Amino acid sequence: MNRLLAKLAITAMTGSLLFSNPIVAQILPPQKKAAHVEITKGPELESAVSYMAIVRWTTANPRGDDEHYGIVNYGTDPEDLSQTAKGHIRLNRAHPETIFRVRLVDLKPQTTYYYKVTSEDSAGQSDGVEGPISHFTTPPAGEVINNYPQPK
Amino acid sequence: MRQDTRTLVRAAFATVLGVLSVPLAGSTDARAQPVDLPANIPPYNPYPSGILPANLQSELDRVKREVETIEGRYFAEYQALISAGLPTPTGLPPTLFPSGYDANRILGGLLNFDLNMSPFRNVACSSCHMPYAGFSGPIPSVNLTMIAYPGSYRYRAGKRVAQRYTYSPRFPVLHLNQQKNFMLRGGTFTGGNFWDGRSTGYLLQSPDAEQAQHPPVDTQEHGLPDTACIALRISQAAYRPLFELVWGVDFDISWPSNVEQICSLPGGAFGSNATPIPLSAFDRTKANNIYDHWGQSISFLEASTDISPFTSKVDAAARGQYTPTAAEAASRTLFQGKGNCNSCHLDGFPTLNPGPNPGVAADTEPLFTCFGYSNLGLPLNPRDSIFYESKADFFGFNPNPDGMRFRDLGFGTFLRSGPGSAPNPNATNWLSFAPLTDGQMQTSTTRNVAMTPPQCPTTEAGQVDANGKPIPYFQKEFFHNGYIKSLKQLVHFYNTRDAFPLPGGPVTSGHCPPGTVEKVNCWPMPEVRNNIDMTVGNLQLTDAEENLLVIALQFQTDGFDPANPTVPGILYKNIDTFTGQCTITAPGVTASTQGNETIIPTFSLTQFPCATDVCGVAPLPSMPIP
């Protein structure tokens, strides 16, 4: 009986050591990655000026690591999408969908850029989604393309 | 003659003359001799006209009086503890029983509000962190102008907004939250204290306790020249017996005969010597142990209900003591939904599963932070005092040799152990991550971002009561560089940072194109364009939805009494100590534009590019930073 009590005491103590101390932190345990992720909207041009553009797309929530990156591989030749831009976003576990947005900087005016999108977590693990080859053209200097102005 | 001896002689001469001369009476001009500096130590004032607010010294004097009031209250609590019977070490290990918690909390209060913890005995920890501002900056005119608060050596100042210390003890030790497969590179930094994470907590296992060890010896803050000065000052304090009761430390240190002179001079007066007090290794260890306990007691205070009480409307509603209004309920829905605020400011209430999720420890007392870091893309704020502190002071110390070439890379600078930060104790493993973290600042808890003194019940200009009478407000500053001046602007920034692309090219603050209004429909370019967080920037919220999110933030203010629902913050300890003036909205000013009258043109980034010791340290930033 004493051996049993001792064993229970040790188990309880070990359990309490493993149980997170709420007074110290509220770090959420990791989520399981979604089995399958698809693009549900876009990719599309959110906005562009002669020197910069923002590309946007929506997927089902990829889950897993809360820290994620949208990735745009792009270039002026659809056969050579060797440039890469990344946009950091943080997943919202309660949202069924995730909006990815990526800035492309140091662009040239009146130039057509081809691009493909994908996403990954902070450890570089892909969400397994890849968008089609899309394109946009930057406007001339002094002009704006804004497909998502602030609503009134 | 060695430099430190020359300094002591010079300072001693100055002190003698100071005793003989009459200090100037309270002038409101910061170029006059401050009453809280020895008369023959001139103030440090390298600033162009207009950078310092005109009422700076009188406001600093006001805050000192308020700090002394609160110190007196904690001393009264100490006396009451004595009268009730001090706790005694009981059991094995010896534990202070039955009131060890009160003893440590009161000690933390006495330490936190003690003006003697500075060379000129004019700055306490709380001088920049007062209760009525959620333990952030207590001077409206500083919040509107110079951003950082003057330290003990008037008017040296730092570079960032004084963070709220409510709930700061809850941040875990800084770590790299890697995936289960440790062979993969990556992960995210989590925990730590300070905007740039430099208080890691790796030794005391508490970033908050270690945070309390930085300002006392920061040249721009308390400015003590040696950490041992804290041990000296505690040894002289009337509450020393309480410190010894709690920590049982040994103050029997063989101080050199000139220790008072040393601790009466600011850091920087002894060159790069970080230990100008010559102590034996044995005595240095004693002083270091006292310094650790200083941090631990202050952290205990900050974790206590004196500072972190969980008494907001959020908490009252969770306990069933308060029913949110329709607007408040709608605001919370936005916070969790379209606003997407709770992706970073975790609130434990997922919208997919209405009601608290008891399976997650956070849910019953949410902290509204993920403990992480992000680069929100704030513009460089040319009002920041640090840009102008590039001249040597009376002691030959130059706070910021980089001048206007300083850029705030936040966490990235810390990982590189860069200027204005601290040595990275895990550089061996973490230095390589610096380019991924340039520009990142801590994700603060949103709790108490809206806290103000009761007599100035809002942070927002342009509010009126039910009778149309203007509501006085308390001017605060937001984010790490104080660029944002109201919660309306804060929400608008999150909502529209990317929604107004500028066709003529990116601009810096103070250079928005004609026909636009900065912070309304023109956002200057980020100070650091690397690693911009794209979770925010174009949330597609309407103006009315933005206003609801302001309500959501106000909903998180501690001190709410369900029995007195219309009186803000009444339960929050020491919220009644503000003795300054509220601000009355000027004609034409709204929460969207408050503070815009203080915008100044940013200096040329081409003429003053990022300094080499900030932007040129390997591993280099992934993109050049202008």
Image (tube, coloured by chain):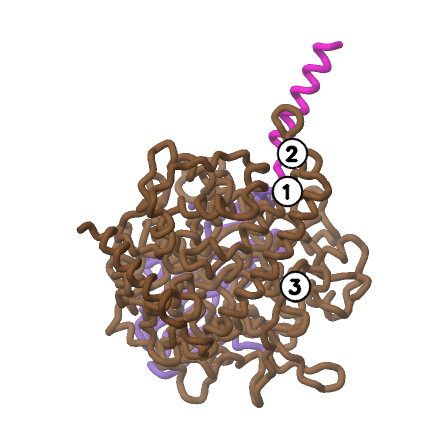
Chain colours: A purple, B brown
| Rendered view: A16 above or below B425 | above
Instruction: Indicate which disc, 3 or 2, sits on the residue closer to the N terminus.
Output: 2
Query: Cα distance, mark 1 to mark 2?
Result: 8 Å
Between the residue at mark 3 and the residue at mark 1, the CA separation in whole angstroms equals 22 Å
Q: Secondary structure at mark 1?
A: helix
Say which element carries label 3: helix
Q: Real-space Cα distance between discs 3 and 2?
A: 30 Å
Q: In the rendered image, is residue B433 in sight?
A: no
Residue ID for mark 3: B575
User: Which residues make up the magenta segment?
Assistant: A1-22
Q: For label 1, count other residues whose C-alpha is less than 10 Å away and answer few (under 14), some (14-19) or many (20+).
A: many
- Residue at x 72% of width, y 15% of height: A5
Task: Check disc 1 and give the amino acid type.
Answer: Ala
Q: Nearer the viewer, mark 3 or mark 1?
A: 1
The residue to which callout 1 is attached is: B103
Which dot marks residue B295? Answer: none
**What residue is disc 2 on?**
B96
Along the line of sight, which residue is nearer the eye, B153 or A142?
A: B153
